[in-house]
Image (spheres, rainbow, N blue to C red):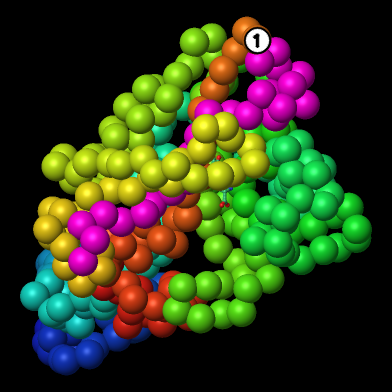
Amino acid sequence: MKDTLLKIKTEAIAALAEDGADIEALRIKYLGKKGELTAVLRGMGKLSAEERPVIGQLANDIRAEIEAEIEKQSAAMKSAALDARLKAEKLDVTIPGTKVPVGKPHPLAMVQRQLEEIFLGMGYSIAEGPEVEYDYYNFQALNIPPDHPARDTQDTFYITENILLRSQTSPVQARVMEKQQPPIKIISPGRVYRSDAVDATHSPLFHQCEGLVVDKGITMGDLKGTLEMFAQTMFGADTRIRFRPHHFPFTEPSAEVDVSCFACGGKGCRLCKGEGWIEILGAGMVHPNVLRMCGIDPEVYSGFAFGLGIERIVMLKYHIDDMRHLYENDVRFLHQF
Ligand code: DAH
């Protein structure tokens, strides 16, 4: 019996040490209720009284040894499995990552945002108006009656006789004044439309930004100071501005405003076509008729207004010679800004 026990022990330990041994199956085989060691112990009744405790002791020792081996082998297998997993899941942090392409704002949006920041900084708020507009706001409330020749230069798309795609952001002036008594200090950037054929400097859809200030005692001096501040922030601290007399039906007096050429400083170059000055916007003192039509008393209040084309500013600032680039969504072009 002693030999059988020792044989079980040798076999069990050898089997447990084998590569890929099924430890649980071996445990059942040797130590389980129907296992080999148990079978031997069952036969102990046949032993003599002297032999019984000796064999019993030996059987217990062997059981303990096999259990210890099981413990040892299963710990070794667990750690080998962990090693293998760590190796398989190894992360090489030096491999370059997958680049996610990042977009950026369109140059038109960039300049619009800059415009907004400049005027918000001067205490203006941003007003919005509809792109599908009444003839009344786009023209009549701005002192442009139905047969006024100024309509010719702003031919647009009509939805009905009285509803059109706005040809300028100026109607927002009338909408704001109608709702709000002075003090008023707003800008209104947005899309406008005209029935122009597409070429390097024209598009049936483009963007403008309107400005309007109405309060007691507003003068042309305020307009000049405001536009100078704007021009210097947008084009550089050395920029000068110049007013040229002009006519707009909704302002009196009216002016076209030039900035000193920011490419040559005013000496004359290709950008300013040798002039030293570049036209950037229209402006003037709000016409008393406009104030009156919007319910503001021109005897008490006065105001100035201005309107600029955002495409024009973008093209000047970034030396873009063809407006169509701004609408073609070619990323090779758009990535340059
Ligand atoms: N709305 C004019 C245009 O589209 C631009 C303009 C000129 C706006 C003078 C104004 C202004 O507010 O005072 O040509």
Residue at 72%, 55% (x, y): give it.
149
Image position, residue 16 (x, y; %): 18, 84
Residue drawn at x 22%, y 41% is: 240
In the image, is residue 297 part of the stretch drawn in magenta? yes
Q: Is residue 66 left or right of residue 28?
A: left
Query: Looking at the image, can residue 5 be seen?
Result: no
Residue 76 x %, y %: 13, 74
Q: Quadrant of ligand 1?
A: top right
Q: Which of 255/74 is in front?
A: 255
Quarter of the image where the N terminus is located: bottom left
**Label 1 sits on what residue type?**
Glu
Which residue, as the protein is rendered here, is positioned at the far front?
245
Callout 1: 10 Å neighbours few (<14), some, many (20+)? few
311 lies left or right of 143: left
Identify residue for label 1: 299
Q: Which residues are magenta?
A: 274-298
Residue at 65% across, 41% down: 249
- 305 within the magenta span: no
